[in-house]
Amino acid sequence: MSDKQEAIKQAAITLFARRGFDGTTVPHVAEEASVGAGTIYRYFENKEVLLNVIMQDEMFRIEESLKAKFPYEKTTRDQFSHLFITLIRYSQENFYALMLINSHTTSRHITDKTKCDYTSLLAFVSTVVEAGREQEMIDRDLPIEAIVAITFGAVVELAKRFNGGELSLTEDLLKTLDEKLWRAISR
């Protein structure tokens, strides 16, 4: 990927997350990326394509991060901890990408492929939750979708607090947050 293409993607991530898709124009992205508007069209057919490419790339990165060093042979508790901590660490390095995904997964502008990628990401997390339920480690009274929503919701809200300077991420705090979230969903 060229430097210009990467600059365009990073600018679009930030602007889409801050202003929304409809509040962001191609000239805004061009200005933020320090390129001409025509340059954007060399790499991306239109703004919708740009949004979908970004979302697909970022969801792939998240899923790859979750799968990297995934403790397949360990307990569901260890697996859940890996998911939560990995998502928090991702949010520290990719705050606007996480905010973009969080706010645009139901956008009318995303393609079926992007929706499929999001479903795949959720399915990976859901698999851990389902295994925990089968082992009677995770609460069966809550639907899997609710547990996944609680988990992602916690990550998103914590990311906002860390990014806004209201909280400072330390290893002790991360460990405590992980334990508290586990308690919220476990039996």
Image: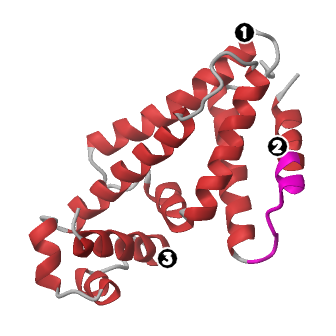
Q: Earlier in the sequence, mark 2 or mark 3?
A: 3
For residue 172, above or below residue 133: below
In the image, residue 125 sits, relative to residue 93, either above or below, namely above
- Mark 2 or 3: in front is 2
Q: CA distance from mark 2 to mark 3?
A: 28 Å
At 53% from the left and 28% from the top, the residue drawn is 124
* Residue located beneath label 3 in the image: 18
Left or right: 38 in relation to 145: left
Task: Identify the magenta region.
Answer: 165-175
Taking the spot 31% from the left edge, 61% from the top edge, the residue there is 51
**Residue 45 sits in quarter:** bottom left
For the residue pair 11 and 73, the one nearer the viewer reads as 73
Which image quarter is the C terminus in? top right
Which residue corresponds to the image point at 61% horizontal and 58% vertical from the top-left? 91
> Which x, y percent locates residue 175?
86, 46
Looking at the picture, which amino acid does disc 1 mark? Glu
Mark 2, other Cα within 10 Å: few <14 / some 14–19 / many ≥20: some
2 and 3 marks in contact (CB < 8 Å) = no
- Nearer the viewer's eye, disc 1 or disc 2? 2
Picture coordinates of residue 121, whole percent (x, y): 48, 36
